[in-house]
Image (spheres, rainbow, N blue to C red):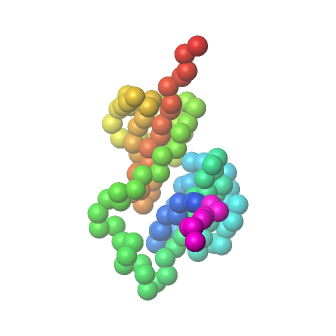
Amino acid sequence: MVFQYTNAFVTIASVNCENLVNFYTKLLEQKPVLLIPNVYAEFNLVSMRLGIFKPKNTNESEFEVIAKSKISLCLEVSNLEDAIAHLTALGYPPLGDISIADHGREIYAYDPDGNRLILHQAPKESH
């Protein structure tokens, strides 16, 4: 038997679920496609689904902020400066300067729960 999957998506647990849903609604400039207030919200992104859920009271301790998360949500953008301005207007300005890598330009920021965001702009193709 071969293991097969039909889809994959990322979820973020937050004891401050509504706050995080509001942040991503503004950041992504879209409302969740599925919303159960203070329980679960889901956004459809290009090629990915992002879910945000409130852990059950019996599991909250697993999600307390003890150390920084090792997972980053990377959002590829068409214009990095516009994305930085948008994030800054939301009150979560990126940290540091834009870094240049082989795969393009990027900058790090954090959402209200301290999850790392990487805003990335691919290099423009030269013709």
Q: How many marks?
A: 0
- Name the quadrant of the C terminus: top right
45 magenta-colored: no
Residue 88 visible in image: no
Residue 83 appears in the picture as rendered: yes
Task: Look at 42% across and 35% down and name the residue there.
Answer: 106
Q: Nearer the viewer, residue 4 or 103?
A: 4
The x and y percentages for residue 20 are 52, 61
| Residue extent of the magenta highlight | 1-7
Q: Report x, y in % for residue 93.
A: 43, 42
- For this orientation, the residue located farthest to the bottom is 58
Name the residue rendered at 49%, 81% in the picture: 56
Residue 30 located left or right of residue 79 = right
Q: Quadrant of residue 125?
A: top right
Q: Residue at x 47, y 40 (%)?
A: 119
Of 110 and 125, the residue lying toward us: 125
- Residue at image position (53%, 60%) is 10
Q: Main secondary structure of the magenta part?
A: loop
Look at the picture and state if 25 lies above or below 107: below
Answer above or below: position of 62 versus 90.
Answer: below
Nearest the viewer among 33 and 91 is 33
Farthest top residue?
Answer: 127
Residue 52 % position (x, y): 55, 65
Q: Residue furthest left?
A: 67
Measured along the vertical axis of the image, is residue 49 above or below residue 120? below
Q: Residue furthest right?
A: 33
Residue 96 falls left or right of residue 121: left
Residue 83 x, y percent position in the rendering:
53, 36
Quarter of the image that includes the N terminus? bottom right
